[in-house]
Image (cartoon, helix red, strand yellow):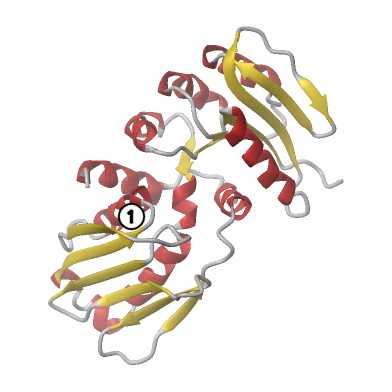
Amino acid sequence: MNAFIATVIVIGDRARVDEAADALDALRDRAAVRRVLISEGTKTTAAPDEQDTTIRIDGLSPQYVDNAVAWLRLSSLPAVVWWRGGPVEALDRLAHLADRLVLDTDPPEAMWERAPALFDETALTDLRWSALTCWRSALAHLVDLPQVRAELGSLRRLEILAPDRPSARLFAGWLRSSLAGIATLEVTIGEARGRTPLTHVRLTGGGPGLTLEVQRENTCLEASVDGAGGVRMVPLGDGSLASRFVDDIRVRARDAAFERALVAAMEMRA
């Protein structure tokens, strides 16, 4: 077996912890991690079940989760806490124990409200952020085109269609924070069906409009600029929980772009 690169501590209700465990199983060939799986319940004492590279504690009361993490984490390995549910108060007590804290709750708003207070405690991010990487990269590529960059100040409207509204808010927050001092955007978010977090993005103003749209097969993202001719195709990847998680933990340091995007997303109240 390859040397461990981290301890991944998954916390949430039993079903969501099991789902994350399956995702980590799928990563065995890509990353060797020591796994700690903690499902929340009412127990006040921990009885770890250790098998191979996995330690499991079932039904632990949230008020004791931080004690279990402090006990089971290793100082010799980075500790990644994958937060899949639980009370905000428990999250507060965990932040200083995590080298990286990955939020993954649905709905996410309660945790997002608290997240800015934890930015200085740990490198914090959200799994929705990694799912938006190709969308952000595709739009950044369009913005780098000379005819678009020259008209950035004229951008006024951002329209998003999304199966997942929080992802749309996070994307809009990223764009608003990135264009702060250059352009002010009016944001409209509409519902859509699909297997991707967003399905359609349209950015318009006084200059050429920009469009990002998922193809019907849900395998590629089509990026285009009005009047420019041609499109750019960006692979979307498989979008699996395993892929999104491994993409997220590749970044070890604080992500300032995410932090700004999250604060802007919460300010929108869209």
Give the image location of residue 128, x and y in percent: 45, 49
Disc tally is: 1
Give the image location of residue 84, x and y in percent: 52, 34
Left or right for 205, reference 191:
left
Secondary structure state at the residue bearing disc 1: helix
Residue closer to the observer: 3 or 215: 215
Q: Residue shown at 17%/79% (left/top)?
A: 207
In the rendered image, which quarter is residue 160 located in?
bottom left
Q: Identify whether 82 is placed above or below 196.
A: above
Name the residue beneath numbered marker 1: 168
Residue closer to the observer: 8 or 39: 39
Task: Give the farthest residue toward the bottom.
Answer: 229
Give the image location of residue 256, x and y in percent: 39, 47
Left or right for 215, reference 4:
left
Task: Give the farthest residue toward the top.
Answer: 44
Q: Identify whether 166 is placed above or below 143.
A: above
